[in-house]
Image (spheres, rainbow, N blue to C red):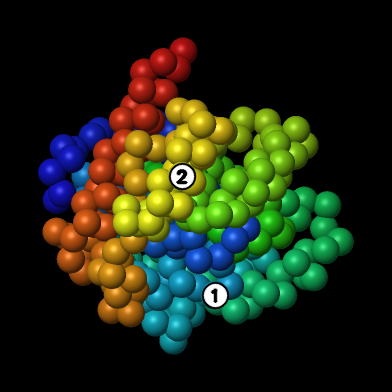
């Protein structure tokens, strides 16, 4: 669809969590547009909206009245993922929507010993189903380091961190990296940082350039080469219930997300090639 070339299914689904405790960094926008771009290569993608605000669901054109079941029903074990999964306006891209019910989940699960493993077990159950294979599962986390985000990090193979090019970017990144290390030591020893994605980059602003330079010096090759620019079309697209790649595939933001998809797929292919 977008000219990346198709890629055969691998035996193992790649589960990526998109996390940053700070809101407004392009986390949801990145989740839905990377999902759209990967689906455009012919791969099967499932997005799990784990944010009570439900912006990923809205951004994929799923109205609130159409969300009969949601990820809340999965995490409370009332439904499985297949019961809640919806088609989207993008071929090969599916969604488990979110609702405001998620706001009360932490108190409901507070006394359960396996409360941090609910999403992991739901995904494992999905993967065990012979007719429910996905190449990628993308989890859009809420803008906080709460139980929902912990569930995502426990369930994921790796994490993508969207990072806005602003003054306090590195300070927030340090806090997130501490959480990732805690999860690795106690809950998911295989969790990796897939990459740091610089977002809302303004080439006219010297601060954007300095932040990008500092992050690359601090994180090295963990920072993607692709940078997402500040772009009006990217901001407009959610109000039309579309990823920007469908809304205006020729704009700078769309091109950047398609480049990111190419970078992510190449990185995963290289990891797969080096696996025993």
Question: Closest to the observer: 253 or 214?
Answer: 214
Q: Residue at x 40, y 46 (%)?
A: 209
What x and y, as percent, mark residue 208?
42, 51
What x and y, as percent, mark residue 65?
44, 86
Q: Is residue 72 left or right of residue 268?
A: right
Label annotation for residue 187: none
Q: Which residue in the rendered view is the most extreme toward the right?
A: 111
In this rendering, the answer to whether 97 lies above or below 265 is below
Tag 1 residue = 53
Judged from the image, the secondary structure of the residue bearing numbered disc 1 is loop
In this rendering, the answer to whether 109 lies above or below 127 is below
Q: Quadrant of residue 130?
A: top left
Mark 1 is surrounded, within 10 Å at the Cα level, by few (under 14), some (14 to 19) or many (20 or more) other residues, namely some
What x and y, as percent, mark residue 239?
33, 79
Q: Is residue 179 left or right of residue 170?
A: right
Q: Is residue 39 left or right of residue 128?
A: left
Q: Earlier in the sequence, mark 2 or mark 1?
A: 1
Tag 2 residue = 210
**Cα distance, mark 2 to mark 1?**
32 Å
Camera sees residue 66: yes
Question: Closest to the observer: 90 or 241?
Answer: 241
Camera sees residue 15: no
Q: Is residue 12 left or right of residue 149?
A: left
What x and y, as percent, mark residue 181?
70, 36
């Amino acid at each position: 669809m977008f000219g990346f070339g198709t890629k055969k299914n691998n035996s193992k689904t790649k589960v990526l969590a998109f996390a940053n405790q700070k809101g407004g960094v392009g986390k949801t926008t990145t989740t839905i547009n990377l999902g759209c771009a990967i689906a455009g290569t012919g791969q099967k993608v499932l997005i799990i909206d784990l944010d009570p605000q439900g912006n990923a669901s809205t951004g994929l054109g799923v109205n609130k009245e159409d969300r009969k079941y949601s990820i809340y029903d999965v995490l409370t074990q009332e439904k499985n993922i297949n019961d809640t999964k919806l088609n989207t306006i993008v071929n090969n891209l599916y969604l488990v929507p979110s609702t405001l019910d998620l706001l009360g989940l932490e108190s409901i699960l507070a006394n359960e010993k396996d409360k941090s493993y609910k999403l992991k077990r739901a995904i494992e159950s999905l993967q065990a189903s012979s007719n429910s294979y996905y190449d990628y599962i993308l989890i859009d986390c809420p803008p906080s380091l709460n139980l929902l985000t912990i569930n995502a990090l426990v369930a994921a193979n790796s994490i993508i961190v969207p990072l806005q090019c602003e003054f306090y970017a590195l300070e927030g990144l340090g806090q997130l990296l501490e959480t990732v290390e805690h999860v690795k030591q106690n809950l998911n020893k295989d969790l990796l940082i897939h990459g740091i994605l610089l977002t809302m980059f303004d080439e006219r602003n010297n601060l954007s350039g300095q932040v990008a330079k500092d992050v690359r010096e601090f994180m090295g090759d963990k920072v993607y080469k692709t940078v997402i620019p500040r772009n009006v079309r990217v901001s407009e697209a959610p109000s039309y219930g579309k990823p920007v790649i469908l809304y205006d595939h020729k704009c700078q933001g769309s091109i950047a997300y398609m480049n990111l998809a190419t970078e992510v797929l190449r990185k995963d292919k290289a990891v797969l090639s080096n696996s025993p």
